Amino acid sequence: MSYIPPNPNGQATKANSSPVVIASDQNAVPVTGTFYQTTQPISGSVSVTGSFWQSTQPVSIASMPSTPVTGTFYQTTQPISGSVTVSNFPASQAVTGSFYQATQPVSIASMPSTPVTGTFYPTTQPVSLATAPTTPVTGTFWQTTQPVSGSFYQATQPISGTVTVTQGTLTKGTQGAVGVSTQDLKDAGRTYICITIDTVTGITTEALATMSINKAGTTTTGTSYAVTTGKTLRITSFCSSVKNTSTVVSTSRIRVRAAATVAATSSILIANETYAPGAVANMGGVDDTTVPDGIEIAAGIQIGISHIEAAITCTASCCLMGYEY
């Protein structure tokens, strides 16, 4: 072993240094300082030089050897048993190639005639049945009369506007084959009115009498009668009478009056003056007034009957006839 003198200046080169042997009973020597990991990150650009080859290299073979392949071989398409689930198969697949329509046109230069042979039967064949079977009929059965919904109009429709009726030509002195029936308005929808005063005692101051009013069979009483709304009252006759109750000659004036509110002084329509011809008890006289065309009273107007006598020794009566329409 060569001798290496100690270096008085401490650290020396490797050639001039002696190996250091740590005693077997030496304690652990602490090492201090900064420690770096084995692989250090590099920041910046690092130049790499040399020859670089691509991952896949071309190979040139003068003669391709035959290499036997052994083992189990399976056909390209394998049968599958069981259920196979494909999760990424698209719903619509593109189909390429030539597509032809379902029905193809056919071009025939000359259509051949093909004879048809065999037995031909008419469309409808006669059937002979000894006994016709009874065949039940099933299904939904509807009643003979079915309900119908929608807008229904009456057989006779109202007409709004002007309607022109052409009357046939009439020749004077010649009876026509066709006539037109008419009805006066006054003759349509009549309701009779009969107003009476029966044997009231004579008075010497004129006043309205209490009347018995019979309208189509319904009787009421009152000193006035109002013509029904929407109707017209036609008076056709008025009859009055007076009768002595003693041996004093009697006279009576009985008047039919009309007004919106009738009174003993209202306008006079009919005035009868009746007297008993002699001074005999129970002797009387009558006065009749007939109006062939009638006297018409408008709706809402009131009529009343007033009377006045020469003495109270008599009775007076009257009857007014007419109708509303």
Image: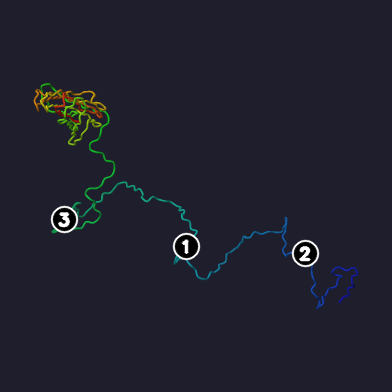
Separation (CA) of disc 3 from disc 1: 62 Å
Give the label on residue 34, or none.
2
Res 292 seen here:
no
- The residue under label 1 is which amino acid type? Thr
Q: Residue at x 50, y 70 (%)?
A: 72
- Mark 2 surroundings within 10 Å by alpha-carbon count, few (fewer than 14), some (14 through 19), many (20 or more): few
- Report how far apart the C-alphas of labels 3 and 2 lie in the structure: 121 Å
- Residue holding disc 1: 85
The quarter of the picture where residue 66 lies is bottom right
Q: Is residue 151 visible?
A: yes
Looking at the picture, how far across and down is residue 314, in whole percent?
A: 14, 27
Residue type indicated by callout 2? Thr
Mark 3 or 2: the one toward you:
2
Q: Residues within 10 Å of mark 1 (few under 14, many from 20)?
A: few
On screen, residue 291 above or below 151: above
Amino acid type of the residue that numbered disc 3 sits on in the rendered structure: Val
Q: Look at the image and tell me in which quarter the C terminus lies.
A: top left
The mark that comes first in sequence, 2 or 1, is 2
Q: Residue furthest right?
A: 8
Tag 3 residue = 127
| Dot placed on the residue nearer the N-terminal end, 3 or 1 | 1
Residue toward you, 249 or 255 = 249
**Going by the picture, which residue comes out furthest to the bottom?**
24
> Residue 237 location, x and y as percent?
15, 27
Query: Which of 143/322 is in front?
Result: 322
Residue at the image position 72 percent from the left and 57 percent from the top: 43
Left or right of 294, for residue 60: right
At numbered mark 1, what does the secondary structure look like: helix, strand or loop? loop
Rendered location of residue 134, percent (x, y): 17, 58
Determine whether label 2 and label 1 are within 8 Å by CB.
no
